[in-house]
Amino acid sequence: MNIKRNWKKLAFFFPFFFLIIFFLLVPFLRMVGQSFRTSSGGFGLERYLEIFSKLAYITAIKNSLWISVSATVIGIVIDFFLALALSKTSEKSKNWYLSVLNLTSTFSGLPLTLSFITILGTAGVLVLIGQQLGIGWLADYNLYSLKGMYVIYVYFQIPMGTLLLLPAFGEIRKEWREAAILMNCNAARFWIRIGIPVMMPAIMGTTSMLFANALTAYTTPYLLINNSIPLLPVKITDMFVGDVRQRPELGSALSMVMLGFMLIVLAVTNLVKKKFEKGRK
Amino acid sequence: MKEKNILGNIVKILTTIFLILPLAVSIVYSFAGQWTSILPKNLTLRFYVEQLTNTQFLTGILRGIVISIIPVVLVNAMILLTLFAVIVYFPKMEKYIQICCIIPTTINGIILATAILSTYSGSSTIFSNRIIMLIFVYCVFCLPVTYQGIRNSLYAVNTKTLLEASSILGANEFYGFVKIIVPTVMPNIMNTALISFSGLFGDFALIKIIASSQYETVQTYLYKNRNTKIQLFCAGVAILLILTMIINLMVHKIASKKCGQTAKEETEE
């Protein structure tokens, strides 16, 4: 009787568990298993050894890490100063800036990349203007390269990061600032010694999100450089849906490597977060 | 102090220009008959007319809306049922449900999509249908936001107490949940649902990986025609942008309506 009654109650979980089991757990475990399957069908690290010994994959990893780490660092610095400036702005103009940020945060993926092709592509508006006015670096701008694409990566880090960081500035109390001024502490020193440590948990949370966002970005590199410059997300998807030769085992292993980097960043940021949260309560 | 504000203003203005520039140029370009020197020439509306009378583009928008609405509705229903059972019958399950809902923030996007694709694409089950696969991938994609939104609003209205009260009055708990709790938290649900919807509507990566040529939405349509006239795709981008802005406005309206409502309730008290 009891089991029967509980069954009825458990039925409420069925749709949810169905989704989790069939579309999260099973595919993920299969991917993990597949990444350890050797070409003879046994269990081994063959795929991983291949990834870390072939130049194409090592370059893909290096490129991916370079673009995501540097875009995250630049992004978080810009986000910090923008959020700082916004936290001091009057309510009315702050709302205006917030709606710009909200609008541009939904402006991503395909439309964003197409827009950048319009302004900085081979026949882009800014490139043409650069040619007419003789501004060399603008006239020769190459969007279809790792460095050229960088600008788009920085672009999509700004709205999201700023919106995430802004609430944290509310934690910096006005009295602290006043007390610091009374004790003859200048602004830079205040932020380094008090402001940033207090905000560190929020900064770290934002950093790991921005990093994951940049590392897994697929649309922008797919449209701009596709396979001419190796990057992890494009390489991974090619292993599953590519036109040439599909190698799901290797793709799974590459996915695991990418996931590994994300988990490392998550772990490091969480450690730093914990350290700064100590003694808070 | 004064100097600091100038610096702050410079930061604000420069980043805003940077953020708005691609948008503004695309919108201006969509009106330009020609743009080969510094300023655009021959302003015209014909690219909008062309795009808005293009059935492929319009069905693309419609298909995009359909494929984004179905997963949002499904995932909201799932989470409501789950959280109902958690709150009323199994409070200890909460932790595990939360973990399940947070996992997709790390195992996200292409990792999950490729894993699901390689698991089911060759199988002869119903999951091998690319559209069904896409719907479920989208469901997992919306899981974190939806869970967080619904959870917070269900706890905010104190669901458990309300349901206990209604069951004392003789109503079945689930009946009370559907008739009392869900309508109360509806504005919140709509709010997170629209956020998920706009995320899905703007997706290109997942649809490209999973359904590539089998289901053409407005995103894949623009991608296929990216090498045609630049003004045409600018007009397409502008139309998409206007659509997202409308969705955003709806979110804000619902949010402010909600605020208005609670304010009204407070004054009535």
Image (cartoon, coloured by chain):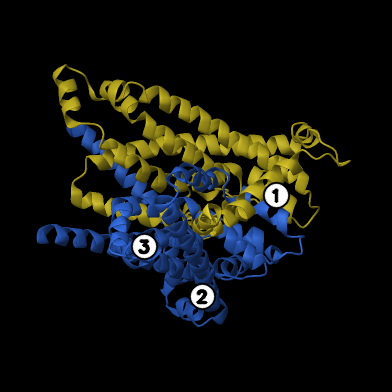
Residue B83 lies, in percent from the top left, at 43, 54
* Above-or-below relation of A240 to A256: below
Question: Is residue A20 found left or right of B130 in the rendered image?
Answer: left
The residue indicated by pointer 1 is A227
* Above-or-below relation of B88 to A264: below
> Around disc 1, counting alpha carbons within 10 Å, would you say few (fewer than 14), some (14 to 19), or many (20 or more)?
few
- The nearer-to-camera label among 1 and 2 is 2
- Chain of the residue on which disc 3 is drawn: B
User: Of the residues shown, which amino acid type is indicated by label 3?
Assistant: Phe
A93 or A145: nearer the viewer = A93
Residue B66 lies, in percent from the top left, at 52, 72
Q: Are both tags, 1 and 3, on one chain?
A: no
Q: How many labels does the image show?
A: 3
Secondary structure beneath label 3: helix
Residue at (66, 46) in percent of width and height: A28
Residue furthest toward the front? A1
Number of the label disc, if any, that sits on residue B177 = 3
- Chain of the residue on which disc 1 is drawn: A
B188 or B92: nearer the viewer = B92
Residue at (29, 53) in percent of width and height: B161
Q: Can residue B149 be seen in this view?
A: yes
Q: Chain B is drawn in which colour?
A: blue
Q: Are both tags, 1 and 2, on one chain?
A: no
